[in-house]
Amino acid sequence: MSRPDSKPDINECEACVAPAKAFSVVGNETRLSILEALWRAEERPVRFSDLRETVEMRDSAQFNYHLQQLTDQFVVNTDDGYDLRYAGKKVVRAVIAGEFNQNPRWGPHELDADCVTCGGSLVAAYEDENITIECADCGHPHGEYPFPPGGLSDRDRDEVMDAFDQRVRHLHCLAADGVCPECSGKMASHVEREGDCCIGSDVRVEHVCQQCGHSLCSAIGLVLLDQSDVVHFHREHGVDLNGTPYWELPWCVSDHGTTVHSTDPFSVTVTIELDGESLAVTIDDDLAVAEVERTTAVPADD
């Protein structure tokens, strides 16, 4: 997948704590316990004495030393006590999500859905913090996207897949709106016709963060999942788009119904057919909807 032409050196940092030092600060069991105690506190800020009691550290001076190492970068000291900064919250969330210390895997898990290409059975697998969906018969890919290990906790596999569907929608919604779901940097989106993608589609959308290089790809149709005309069209035909997994929609995982009108700039129409009616949505290279046309099939003469 494409990346920004030049990515920043993560060791270069002006007017901030050097990254290596920042990670060394939280590489301590007591300090992680302090962050967790603040995270789990019912009310924040938390007073020094209450925080020390929660961490169960008798030596006040030693506790204060560790707390001060966290202060400013991960913890803020206010008149009412201590609270987490954004960086502190991110550390705790990453640990809870299992991003640092878990590496589970499972699959293949058969889904109650058919391949949009051959009608075969779809299977899902979890490995390397990604969920991959493909056809067990023809191998057509139906998406491969990140899913933190913490998302597997307290869910059976069907519940995991429901959560995965909602996460994919959320990630691509943010990306299409120009916000990187990883770092909140500026996301650039464009229509692409060459290269590899986790969807079995020749024409696709590429989202690439200009700050951290995070990227996502999808079939053109996936960016239309929350488009008002598309949602209304399906609702009129008794289909709840929010309750239908994206991998069951041919226009979200393939070139089905996709027509390219021009490539410089790109102009692409996605045609969705339901019960004899069709909705044709044309988007431009910036993923903006340029035209929407709805037609009803004319019955053939007897």
Image (tube, grey):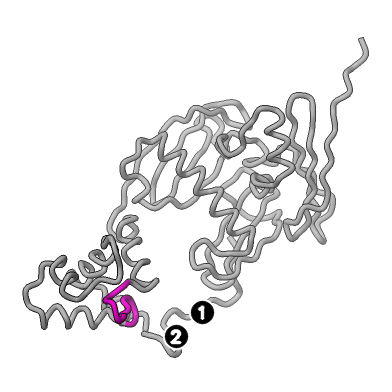
Kindly identify which numbered label has been placed on residue 234: none
Dividing the image into 4 quarters, which one contains the N terminus? bottom right
> Does 7 appear in magenta?
no
Question: Where in the figure is residue 231, as x and y percent of width and height?
Answer: 68, 40
Residue 225, placed above or below residue 36: above
Where does label 1 land, which residue? 8
Secondary structure beneath disc 2?
loop
Question: Where in the figure is residue 143, as x and y percent of width and height?
Answer: 54, 44
Residue 202 located left or right of residue 45: right
Which residue type does callout 2 highlight? Glu
Residues 270 and 32: in front is: 32
Q: Residue at x 62, y 37 (%)?
A: 241
Q: How packed is label 1: few (under 14 Cα within 10 Å), some, or many (20 or more)?
A: few
* Residue extending farthest bottom: 15
Which residue type does callout 1 highlight? Pro
Q: Residue at x 54, y 52 (%)?
A: 170
Q: CA distance from mark 1 to mark 2?
A: 8 Å
Magenta stretch bounds:
72-83
Residues 5 and 78: in front is: 78
Quarter of the image holding residue 158? Answer: top left
Q: Residue at x 58, y 58 (%)?
A: 174
Number of numbered discs present?
2
Secondary structure beneath disc 1?
loop
Residue 144 located left or right of residue 33: right
CB atoms at circles 1 and 2 under 8 Å apart? Answer: yes
Q: Residue at x 49, y 49 (%)?
A: 167
* Residue extending farthest front: 80
Residue 27, placed above or below residue 236: below
Dividing the image into 4 quarters, which one contains the C terminus? top right
Question: Where in the figure is residue 292, as x and y percent of width and height?
Answer: 82, 44
* Residue extending farthest right: 301
Where does label 2 land, which residue? 12
